Amino acid sequence: MSWFSLSRFFAVLRKEFIQMRRDRVTFAMMIGLPIVQLMLFGFAINSDPRHLPTLVEINDDGPLVRAVLAGMATSDYFDFIGTVHGPAAGDDALRRGTASFVVVIPADFERDVMRGRHPDLLIAADAADPAAVGGAAAALGGIVSVASAQTLTGPLASLAGSPAPFGIIVHRQYNPEGRTSTNIVPGLLAIILSMTMVMITAVAIVKERERGTMEMLISTPVKPLEVMLGKILPYVLVGYVQTTVFLLAAFVVFGVPFEGSFLAFFIGFNLFILGNLALGFLISTLARSQMQAMQLSFFTILPSILLSGFMFPFAGMPGWAQTLGSAVPATHFIRLVRKVMLKGADSADVAGQFGALAAIMVVFAVLAMLRYRQTLD
Amino acid sequence: MSEAAVIDVQGLTKTFGSKLVVDHFDIVVPRGAIYGFLGPNGSGKTTTIRMLCGLLEPDAGAGTCLGFDVRRQAGEIKKQVGYMTQKFSLYEDLSIRENLDFVAQMYGVKNRKDRVRTALLDLGLADRAGQLAGTLSGGWKQRLALAACLIHDPQLLLLDEPTAGVDPKARRDFWDEIRRLSKAGVTVLVSTHYMDEAVQCDFITYIAYGKKLIDGPAAEIATMVGLTTWRAEGPDLAALEAELGGQAGVAQIARFGSTLHVSGTDATALETTVRRLEASGQHVWSLQPAGLEEAFIYLMAGAQDNFARDVP
């Protein structure tokens, strides 16, 4: 068989396996990626999140109210975290993201039910991420009919039938139409910035080492900080351009509003970019080739997509995954962007995100500095 | 040590992982000298040069380079050293002028624009200054690299196999330049594999498997090794080579074109052997002046291969 030599074919095959084994990073990626994905998709991601933080504004009390609230609490969907007084406090909690729902029991609710006046139970939902609250909102109907059937017994049993003796009005705030694009587009900014910032920085630095120009560079009296800043700053500008283009496109093409403070956005966005650049620099100290730098960058971007609340609701993840997700800068940036763009937040509202982004950036930067060597060792 | 020494280091040692790459290396380079750094591939020449200019931190050893401590004052040393890497290490995607300008800025060269213009003129590349460095041929890349490492008028040049892969004409021009610089007071440490370059040096050190085997004035090295070499001319040298193997006084046999060089340290024993073979009348024998190449091959054969053993 002259057209196909088995021994040549096996020689190529064998050589490929040898090279695969020698390239540790690639090998680790091949084994590690599927495991990470399996864990994330299998355990962490839940597109029908439960245990959403819920506040109650109680203006009436009685057996029916208690039954409805108990039904909500036992449904897994709602975790009651407290009570509020007055509509302002509830709105504030929704805007700051401390609560996903505020249940408002109107005054004289019980009496109006008994009299057959068909009052409304008001539920304000943070619909910035429609997927996060959709399941819970849909489950409300069932919870309410069970609660009323349990409470309205005896002479009141006639009220318990359908239609329900009271209505439920779910008020979707911040994204009244429940459009996915409104939520996805701001989140996408975080992902795009992560991808380009981390990857470009890592590759740009590793390239110097791979091509040998780093040896020339560090044989001159140049200082590490000069190299670091000089190499990073151009990509900060790239990030600025990307973001400007992105925001314009989001507004013009998708009609995503920008409700909040530009200053808050600007501060958060710079912290986020710097954090990503520091991560890119850190990766460049670990990778030996541009290919490895690409792979490692991609590896760090996975959690930004899967654990940050970008693709899947953050509240739907188990505790450990939420902890993991909190270490990802994109998580905080996505929250910040959604709050500022959709909920009209200002700097004070997103101070927590500023803090988290700054802390993550400092950690990455310190690690990168510690690992960076101005020698070839 | 001496006041005039530009490089004066003792006991320089470097290991990578479990590999001992440079083993207690001493070197003293007088000011203005051309110092040849010879040794087989992988003998630790590049590692030593990198330690001298602060790119690698020695595991042990101490000394000075241009009067600065090699361990603690790398920053000061870098300012006055021009280092030419073995592999072309300028930016291939920058133009010739941009590369020179960049390097000049790294060293904080005064009157940078003028200095770069002069360098371009000296190079003979003034009309091609906008060409990308990556598109230059090997010889031109080498000249550009030399120009770049001279741009800040260094006192010491560290050249790591600067002429590897360069044609003979370019090599000769390069050495003319090196001698000119040396006359102007620049000290040059240059590693090479070429014997014709080695003989142009004032001093030579020969290193193998990380250990220094010999050093001294280039003209005396061959004599210092103490090798006597006879040259044989005639038919069927392969048979002669086989016959010579293991004979008294024969330490090394090497083919040089159509001649055979037979060397040994025991001149009397070697001569006895040669005279006996000469009697057969088949070959013409003559005594060779002491040569560097035979000396190095001889030294190399006796050196211990450090890379075959792990560091305890």
Image: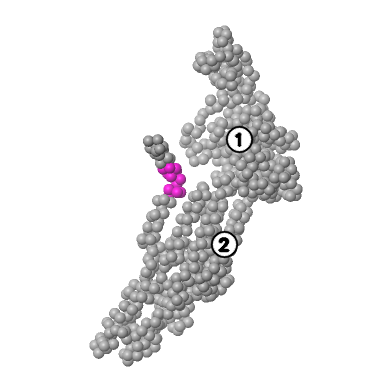
Image: A287 above or below B186: below
Residue B282 occupies quadrant: top right
Residue B30, visible in the rendered structure: no
A44 vs B240, left or right, is left
Q: Residues within 10 Å of mark 1 (few under 14, many from 20)?
A: few
Residue B92, visible in the rendered structure: yes
Q: Main secondary structure of the magenta part?
A: helix
- Residue B256 vs residue B9, the one in the foreground: B256
Please name the amino acid that badge 2 sits on: Gly
The percent position of residue B100, horizontal first and vertical second, equals 68, 47
Q: Residues within 10 Å of mark 2 (few under 14, many from 20)?
A: many
- Marks 2,1: beta carbons within 8 A: no
Element type at marker 2?
Answer: helix
User: Does residue A23 belong to the magenta stretch?
Assistant: yes
Report which residue position mark 2 lands on: A239
Element type at marker 1?
Answer: loop
Residue drawn 48% across and 39% down? Answer: B18
Magenta range: A16-28
Image: A286 above or below A93: above
